[in-house]
Amino acid sequence: MLRACHLPPIATPALCALRLSLIPSLHLSSPSNLHKVSTLAPFQTSVPQTFTPTSPYLSPWSLKRVFPMQGHPCPKGAASFSAGGNSEGSREILVQHLLVKEDDQKLLLDLQQRVSGGEDLSDLAVEYSICPSKEEGGMLGWVRKGQMVPEFEEAAFNAPLNKVVRCKTKFGWHLLQVLSEREESLLQDIQTEEFHAKMQDPNFLEEAQLIDVREPDEVARASLPGFQVFPLQQFGIWGPEITTKLDPQKDTYVMCHHGMRSLQVAKWLQTQGFKRIFNVSGGIHAYAVKADQSIPTY
């Protein structure tokens, strides 16, 4: 699912219900116009799925839906209650939840009984949750360790699949459900000199997929061969279809002018199930200065 939470922390408590560092928020703006955009922010974030951008490349629109990944529907599992389980290791989990106030014990017990009776947690979240994620049926998307407040993280990462677990955080009482799990993906910077060496190998362009997230006028000034252009300000067009345009299983390299917009997109791709993502450190500017002086700078 797509959510974007802002790279810097979003301070509003009502919008920061769970995550310590949620999903990448994309900063979409034009150099002359800075706006904040948001689509879902039920979390307390330090890294970045509501778009809340703040880079010099923020566009003045608001994305109000969380886009499900193509081919990765959010399952509705038959739920039962559990005290937790055990699984450890380098993995990500797909979580949905609902949140009620700490003193609303009667509602909490009633909701537990209704889930045990066969009602779906996501349907109840829409009606009763006080977390902004209620707009998406309580879906928080794929999370890794270190992204959630400790109490929620402990409960979620110890919960068996499809078991509804109750836990308490400073925000109130949660009923949470882990719907799926997968191996954690890789996201790292690649230096321009190393990337340039890879570009000299003809097989590299066949085996990897390269994304340039700059705007068309920037690409016209300077570009590298083999890159598909996905302008960040056109995210609303290509974002919902990204897994039909690109293969999440292939190594994916993301580039922009100086490496900031590309890092935001790389973090978002990680939430969309891409397994190995590399951000070109310093962007095409660093590539032109350090690796290939034939590329114009601007």
Image: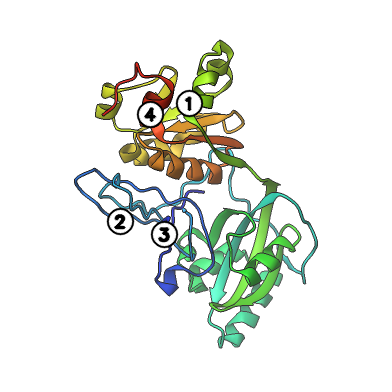
Q: Which residue is mark 3?
A: 8
Residue 107 appears anywhere in the view: yes
Q: Is residue 242 above or below residue 171?
A: above
Q: Nearer the viewer, mark 4 or mark 2?
A: 4
- Residue 296 pos. (x, y %): 29, 21
Q: CA distance from mark 3 to mark 4?
A: 25 Å
* Nearer-the-camera pick, 180 or 186: 186
The residues bearing labels 1 and 3 have C-alpha atoms spaced at a distance of 27 Å
Q: Could you give the CA–CA distance between mark 3 and mark 2, rounded to whole angstroms?
A: 12 Å
**What kind of element bears circle 2?**
loop
In the rendered structure, which amino acid carries the disc numbered 3?
A: Pro
Residue 169, percent across and down? Answer: 60, 76
Query: In terms of sequence position, does the residue under pointer 4 or pointer 1 come before the other?
Result: 1
Q: Is residue 74 left or right of residue 231?
A: right
Residue 217 position in % (x across, y down): 24, 28
**Marks 3 and 4 in Cβ contact (< 8 Å):** no
Label 2 amino acid? Lys
**What amino acid does circle 4 point to?**
Ile
Q: Position of 17 compared to 224: left or right?
A: right
Which tag, 1 or 2, sits closer to the chain's start? 2
**Contact? badges 1 and 2 (CB < 8 Å):** no
Using the numbered discs, state the Cα–Cα distance from disc 4 to disc 2 in whole angstroms: 26 Å
* Residue nearer the viewer, 209 or 108: 209
Q: Nearer the viewer, mark 1 or mark 3?
A: 3
Can you say whether 259 is above or below 109 in the image? above
